[in-house]
Image (tube, grey):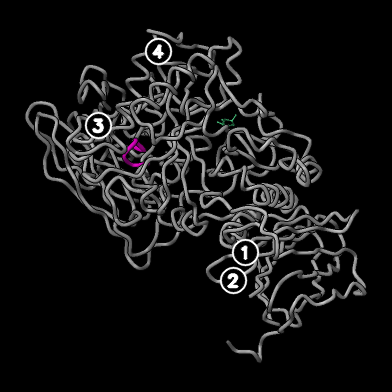
């Protein structure tokens, strides 16, 4: 031990004479409880173009021509002087049953010098990066035994600049699959003002289906994920991922729920479905893609199981009517975690992942307190009994936490965990955080705060007016978030899991605000709340220490210790406009290094990050000296601070 850098003290009398605005006493002799090892996680659903137009790296929008029944939205005809073309949806030439329409392209005039065809504008542009290889693929057929080569290009919106190109030889009269790569040169400019084109050099009729373009993906996986967003998530060190929703699990109707069996296998077999957030999902992010996503983040799945209730009020009566849905949940569990010798485990192996995934938690439905017909009790009981009989090791999460936080039993069953959701104003969080969970009865189920976020203004996230605000929250919201996280961490004997929501937003169009991470087709950024969460989840021990603030202070916090390294993590939130001097008293410590690392996130209340200014509010690291039995720490105005004592 390097004694020179350590201040040694055996339970010394505390220096209470420090001139301070407030005191914090940390008691090492009394660990309050264990920190849940899976406290920090992520929640996800298809909202704000979170998968399509977001994490799922597909660049072509409306790739299967199913987004609109009348017109090929996001596609346009490409013609000019010396070329002419018309395009239309053609249900008469389907690729197959899953993709029951195609795009018909009638080229009436074209030549090698003046080709004609179609363009896709992507999700608010196709992102161009220099020296980058894109994988394009499509199904096509031509009228009467063939047509001219099809040339593909990533080009500027006006077609004047070609960033990358490739060609496939003549088509045949039958549907065939074509694949090419397109590579940009080193001079290609970074832009989203680009499109994908497919053009013909001779007159004729061609049909297209499932046109796809992928940039490089995380781990270079086909049908994969955006690397920049994946890295941001991995940096949060999530221990679990709750999927596939939220409302997205339930759908507006039973028919439009997340029907996991329809999301497996080749993309040509995935029809997609209308989502509850007013746009259609490709289902490119299917069940296996979610599981691979978990695996890549080293996070365990928290699997949302459709439980017979959809948002517009349709429900399945408990009893025999619900049995097929219970069986569907069994099949899903088997797909995720069953052996390859089982029917659905074998399907998973066929889909490319022989090994079972770890599965410990299933959530039965989503926000079923909204089922005003009161059928959840019966539905929950039926799922619970069936799952506990077949998979006794699985923990069942109930979704009625908000409605009945003290409810220990649902229809006679004690859920393992209750999911509670909190979307609240910053002021509500600041006011409620010091005592909210402290009041809970510890003999009830554990609590999963499966959705939470602070909003800055009087507009709540589901209020239409709130969408006038920026897609991601500002520093003020981060202060509310940090206070709430501190409350959950202090009570992590009870709050075993928690995750912010929503996770993602495409800044071009969104149905909800605030959201944690923003992006367009090319760039991404974390909100101040993202950095607050990163600071919290990266600095957590395994036991909670008793921490007491002096009366009347607005400062909030949480203290944990890592039993292996001995590091003490002190997290502090100063929601006030002035710097605050905090006298920290260490009670019952044998020794502490006189130098300590500090990480601070501090900014004006309305300061925020954006695509234009992605790092305006980011944490700053520093070191303080003079740490001892009692020592002062200055908290910046409007700040979140993590202090690491060794
Ligand atoms: O996160 C947005 C929505 O809020 C979720 O879909 C739903 O569960 C909640 O009401």
Mark nearer the viewer, 3 or 4: 4
Q: Residue furthest bottom?
A: 4
Q: In terms of sequence position, does the residue under pointer 3 or pointer 2 come before the other?
A: 3
**Image disc number at residue 566:** 2
Q: In terms of sequence position, does the residue under pointer 1 or pointer 4 come before the other?
A: 4
Mark nearer the viewer, 4 or 2: 2
Mark nearer the viewer, 1 or 4: 1
Residue 277, visible in the rendered structure: no
The reply to whether the magenta stretch includes residue 45 is: no
**Cα gap from disc 4 to disc 2, whole angstroms:** 51 Å
**Image disc number at residue 209:** 3
Q: Residues within 10 Å of mark 3 (few under 14, many from 20)?
A: many
**Cα gap from disc 1 to disc 4, whole angstroms:** 47 Å
Left or right side of 40 for 117: left
The reply to whether the magenta stretch includes residue 285 is: yes
State yes or no: discs 1 and 3 in contact (Cβ < 8 Å): no
Residue 430, visible in the rendered structure: yes
Q: Which residue is under mark 4?
A: 322
**Cα gap from disc 3 to disc 2, whole angstroms:** 59 Å
State yes or no: discs 3 and 4 in contact (Cβ < 8 Å): no
**Image disc number at residue 561:** 1
**Cα gap from disc 3 to disc 4, whole angstroms:** 37 Å
Q: Residue at x 69, y 29 (%)?
A: 463
Mark nearer the viewer, 3 or 2: 2
Q: Residue at x 39, y 47 (%)?
A: 294
**Cα gap from disc 2 to disc 1, whole angstroms:** 6 Å
């Amino acid at each position: 031990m390097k004694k020179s850098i350590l201040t040694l003290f055996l339970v010394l009398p505390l220096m209470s004479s420090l001139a301070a605005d407030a005191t914090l006493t940390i008691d090492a002799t009394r660990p309050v409880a264990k920190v849940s090892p899976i406290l920090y996680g992520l929640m996800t659903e298809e909202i704000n173009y979170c998968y399509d137009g977001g994490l799922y790296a597909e660049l072509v929008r409306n790739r299967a021509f199913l987004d609109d029944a009348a017109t090929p939205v996001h596609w346009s005809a490409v013609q000019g002087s010396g070329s002419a073309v018309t395009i239309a949806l053609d249900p008469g030439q389907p690729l197959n049953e899953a993709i029951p329409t195609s795009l018909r392209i009638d080229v009436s005039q074209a030549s090698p010098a003046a080709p004609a065809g179609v363009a896709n504008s992507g999700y608010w542009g196709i992102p161009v990066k220099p020296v980058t290889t894109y994988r394009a693929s499509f199904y096509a057929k031509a009228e009467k035994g063939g047509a001219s080569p099809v040339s593909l290009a990533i080009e500027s919106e006006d077609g004047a600049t070609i960033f990358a190109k490739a060609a496939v030889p003549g088509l045949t009269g039958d549907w065939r699959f074509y694949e090419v790569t397109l590579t940009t040169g080193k001079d290609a400019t970074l832009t989203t003002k680009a499109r994908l084109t497919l053009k013909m050099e001779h007159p004729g009729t061609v049909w297209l289906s499932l046109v796809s373009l992928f940039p490089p993906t995380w781990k270079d996986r086909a049908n994969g994920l955006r690397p920049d967003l994946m890295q941001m998530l991995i940096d949060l060190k999530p221990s679990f991922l709750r999927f596939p929703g939220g409302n997205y699990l339930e759908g507006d109707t039973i028919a439009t729920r997340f029907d996991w069996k329809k999301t497996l296998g080749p993309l040509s077999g995935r029809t997609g479905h209308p989502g509850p957030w007013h746009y259609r999902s490709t289902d490119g992010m299917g069940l296996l893609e979610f599981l691979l996503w978990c695996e890549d983040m080293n996070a365990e799945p928290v699997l949302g199981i459709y439980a017979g209730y959809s948002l517009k009020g349709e429900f399945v009566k408990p009893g025999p009517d619900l049995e097929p849905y219970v069986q569907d949940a069994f099949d899903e569990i088997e797909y995720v975690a069953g052996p390859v010798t089982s029917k659905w485990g074998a399907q998973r192996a066929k889909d490319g992942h022989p090994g079972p995934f770890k599965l410990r938690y299933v959530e039965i439905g989503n926000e079923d307190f909204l089922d005003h017909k009161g059928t959840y009790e019966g539905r929950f009981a039926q799922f619970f009994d069936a799952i506990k009989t077949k998979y006794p090791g699985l923990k069942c999460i109930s979704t009625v936490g908000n409605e009945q936080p003290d409810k220990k039993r649902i229809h006679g069953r004690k859920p393992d965990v209750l999911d509670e959701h909190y979307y609240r104003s910053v002021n509500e969080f600041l006011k409620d955080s010091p005592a909210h969970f402290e009041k809970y009865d510890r003999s009830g189920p554990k609590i999963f705060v499966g959705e939470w976020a602070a909003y800055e203004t009087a507009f709540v996230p589901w209020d239409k007016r709130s969408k006038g605000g920026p897609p991601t929250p500002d520093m003020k919201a981060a202060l509310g978030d940090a206070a709430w996280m501190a409350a959950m961490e202090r009570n992590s004997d009870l709050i075993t899991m928690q995750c912010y929501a929503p996770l993602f937003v495409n800044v071009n169009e969104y149905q909800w605000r605030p959201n944690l991470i923003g992006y367009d087709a090319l760039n991404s950024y974390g909100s101040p709340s993202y950095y607050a969460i990163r600071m919290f989840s990266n600095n957590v021990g395994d036991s909670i220490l008793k921490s007491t603030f002096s009366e009347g202070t607005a400062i909030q916090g949480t203290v944990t210790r890592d039993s292996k390294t001995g590091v003490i993590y002190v997290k502090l939130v100063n929601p006030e406009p002035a710097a605050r001097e905090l006298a920290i008293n260490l009670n019952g410590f044998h020794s502490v290094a006189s130098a300590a690392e500090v990480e601070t996130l501090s900014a004006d209340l309305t300061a925020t990050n954006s695509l234009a200014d992605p790092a305006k509010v980011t944490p700053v690291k520093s070191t303080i000296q003079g740490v001892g039995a009692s020592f002062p720490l200055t908290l910046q105005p409007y700040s979140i601070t993590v202090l690491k004592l060794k």
